[in-house]
Image (tube, rainbow, N blue to C red):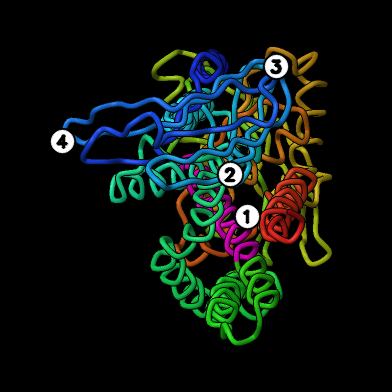
Amino acid sequence: MLSIVLAVLVYFFIASHSYSELVFASEKKLAPSQISYEVSDSDIISTDIECRQASDGKYEYYLSVKPVNPGTASVEYKVGGVGDRLIMNSTGLGTIYEDEFLKFNGQEALLPAMLLIMLIVLVCFTHTFVEMFRAGDFSYSMAVLGGVILYLAGILIIITVYCVQEQVWVWMPLSFIGALLFYTGAIFPIVTAPAMLLLAAALFVSNIWLLRREGFRFQNLLSALLGFAIIAAYAAIMIFAVLPEQSGVILVRLSSAVQSIISYVLGYLECMLFSCMICAVLSTVYKPPFDKDYIIILGCAICSDGTPTPLLRGRIDRAIAFESEQFSKSGKHAFFVPSGGQGSDEVISEAESMKRYLMEQGIPEEQIVPEDKSVNTLQNMEFSKTVIEKHGSGARGKKIAFSTTNYHVFRGYTMAHKASMHAHGLSAKTKLYFYPNALVREFIGLLYEQKKKHIAVVAEIIILITLYCITPYLL
């Protein structure tokens, strides 16, 4: 709402100002005979040349243009022997602009207003992100919002730093602002290059660690593949950046467009990756309220003798610890829902294995509601929801948590959302080398689940940059 109000105020500021451009400066005041101008259609634009004395004592002559009716007119002026011919346009909304650079009346308000609107949007998005964290509403939508926040913040910082260094806060025509936005997006991945290349190296190291501990499987190569993709993207940017100017104007401009497209898309995906990582970490540190009616324990592989693996025991122990703390603080017990079917190489179902372990830890059987048909995380959530509905006469209004390993918590949230179930995650600790590969998997999941949005954004980037680059050949 604030952004809309500010945009309206800027419009009225522009519409209420006349176009004025400095065309000549002199130590002495000129005689009227040294000043002349001619307008091709006075019904469209009213023109005058005004003399203003500057603080340094010089006489400055400004070409001032006011709209009469909408349309186009040529303005020829000559001041002190210096002249030019300008094509001026007047809109029905009271705006005058010059064709060549798209300079317009009130343009000094455009850049500060644009940055302020970006800041307002950034603050509003950040507030929404914080509220989602407080509510424990971790999802791919939250990750997308976080990516937009990071990207918008990066663009805002880069533009602000440039404007401060170049001192261009006031005078900036529309064409210059377009160029500024164009090159800012291209600069973004260059600014983040150290962090991204360090991340790529870390992904390679963690992947080697994972392969040595867990064996060779395609899903265990995700970190290395992402690291390779990051390096390849930066290599492509460098190749197009060093294309010789002797290649010809069209080829150089085409390579610039391709480089900018890669840079923009890379910057966008970088922000989505970092946001996904941030959301995944935040989901593990979030502390759910002690008001749960059911705690789903997400299953994983069990030992050959039917006992839980250390990884699975960690999930069960985390659920027991939370339930115990909840009872001590609120006096409310929660039902345990061990969730997991029987694999082809397992002697019993994962749910049965977890149930036996729970009972060994002193949990009464009547407090355990097993779900023994699921074979993946989504089915864990869907089938557990059905079990809870049958056991508790409907899941509506029931407070639900799920317990899983820390690297798997964010995925648990996303699958709970897919199952139309609101649940809070409980994080069990595990070995560090699982984390990077799991985070990469969630990033891939983010791109896949929100693929229409991401495709639309990438398509817009390609179209806008292409139009920007070919515009000189269309005019």
In which image quadrant can residue 231 be found? Answer: bottom right
Q: Nearer the viewer, mark 1 or mark 4?
A: 4
Disc number placed over residue 85 in the picture, else none:
2
Residue 452 percent across, percent down from the top left = 80, 45
User: What amino acid is found at the position of numbered circle 2 in the picture?
Assistant: Arg
Q: Is residue 57 left or right of residue 203?
A: left
Q: Earlier in the sequence, mark 1 or mark 2?
A: 2
Residue 283 percent across, percent down from the top left = 51, 39
Judge by depth and name the residue closer to the eye, 169 or 447: 169
Q: Earlier in the sequence, mark 2 or mark 4?
A: 4
Judge by depth and name the residue closer to the eye, 132 or 218: 132
List the residue tagged with mark 1: 443
List the residue tagged with mark 3: 69
Q: Is residue 204 left or right of residue 397?
A: left
- Location of the N terminus by quadrant is top right
Q: Which residues are magenta?
A: 260-284
Distance from label 1 to label 2 (Cα)? 55 Å
User: What amino acid is found at the position of numbered circle 1 in the picture?
Assistant: Phe
Disc number placed over residue 56 in the picture, else none:
4
Distance from label 2 to label 4 (Cα)? 28 Å
Q: Are marks 2 and 4 in contact (CB under 8 Å)?
A: no
Whether residue 143 is visible here, answered yes or no, is: yes
